[in-house]
Image (tube, rainbow, N blue to C red):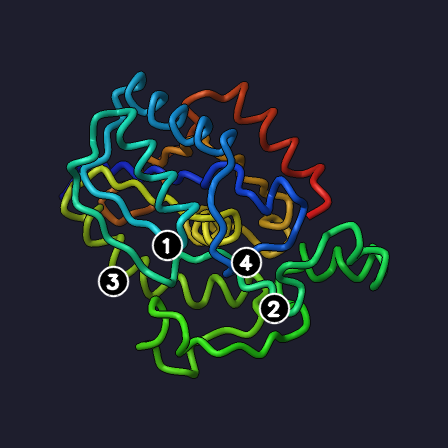
Amino acid sequence: MSGAMATLILLRHGQSEWNLANLFTGWVDVDLTEKGEVEAVRGGELMLGADVLPAVVHTSLQKRAIRTAELGLAACDRSWIPVRRSWRLNERHYGALQGKDKKETSEQYGADQVKIWRRSFDVPPPVLEWDASADPRYCELPPDVIPGSECLADVLARMLPYWYDGIAPDLVAGRTTLVAAHGNSLRALAMHLEGLTPDEVLELNIPTGQPRVYELDDRLAVRSWRYLDPESAAAAAEAVSRQAG
């Protein structure tokens, strides 16, 4: 691929039912809201309008990302492309906070502590003990890779093997590659791609349903990146930064 550029598209899933309810979601498998479905379709329309059309898609194992990919691809007439999925693209595991109301959690533990759990690079929330063997998506994974809680550093560490072994080969082969995933798994990937520091990545807010398009050189270093609808993406990113969680 000497001298060529590869195109990578990151697409954060649209609003989920628990986003709307202001609950910590993590690995809980909730669906999109109607607004989330509209956001996913809009992402596909933006790709179609910009003629940035994926040749392969990678998603997590969570339905909000899977459905975002399906709706977006249908909107740009690319439902037929190959699909690859991995638990390594899942959202960050929020541990014992999963299912809790974000406002009530702040009242219980203090806003400063919750902010540390949410936004620090290397401080995970309290651990949740759960039985992954009861979930067919994860029952065949080695127990020592199943998280009970994760900080962003943990997400980066478990995501990177899939970047190197799953996503990068598609890019090296010249395929325009869509990754439909989650706020934290995509922040971790952006951190790796852009060489962001732990402090810098804390300020990165990836908006829902807005394709973030990277042009990479033949060594998969970033040449440039952009949103296909910069004005809407900026407004949506600002909304993410104002969320309680």
Q: Are there few (<14), some (14-19), or many (20+) residues within 10 Å of tag 4? A: many
Q: Tell me the CA gap for discs 1 and 3.
A: 15 Å
Label at residue 60:
1
Identify the residue position indicated by label 3 in the image.
Answer: 165
Q: Residue at image x 47%, y 45%?
A: 31
Q: Are there few (<14), some (14-19), or many (20+) residues within 10 Å of tag 1? A: many
| First-in-chain label (2 vs 1) | 1
User: Do callouts 4 and 2 mark residues in contact (Cβ within 8 Å)?
Assistant: yes
The residue type indicated by label 3 comes to Asp
| First-in-chain label (4 vs 3) | 4
* 25 is higher (above) or lower (below) than 221: below
State which quadrant residue 144 falls in.
bottom left
| First-in-chain label (4 vs 2) | 4
State which quarter of the image contains the N terminus: top left
Q: Residue at image x 73%, y 45%?
A: 244
State which quadrant residue 125 falls in.
bottom right
Residue 209 or residue 215, whichever sits in front? 209
| First-in-chain label (1 vs 4) | 4
Residue 149 or residue 123, whichever sits in front? 149
Judge depth for marks 1 and 3 and give the one in front: 1
| First-in-chain label (1 vs 3) | 1
Identify the residue position indicated by label 4 in the image.
Answer: 26
| First-in-chain label (2 vs 3) | 2
The residue type indicated by label 4 comes to Gly
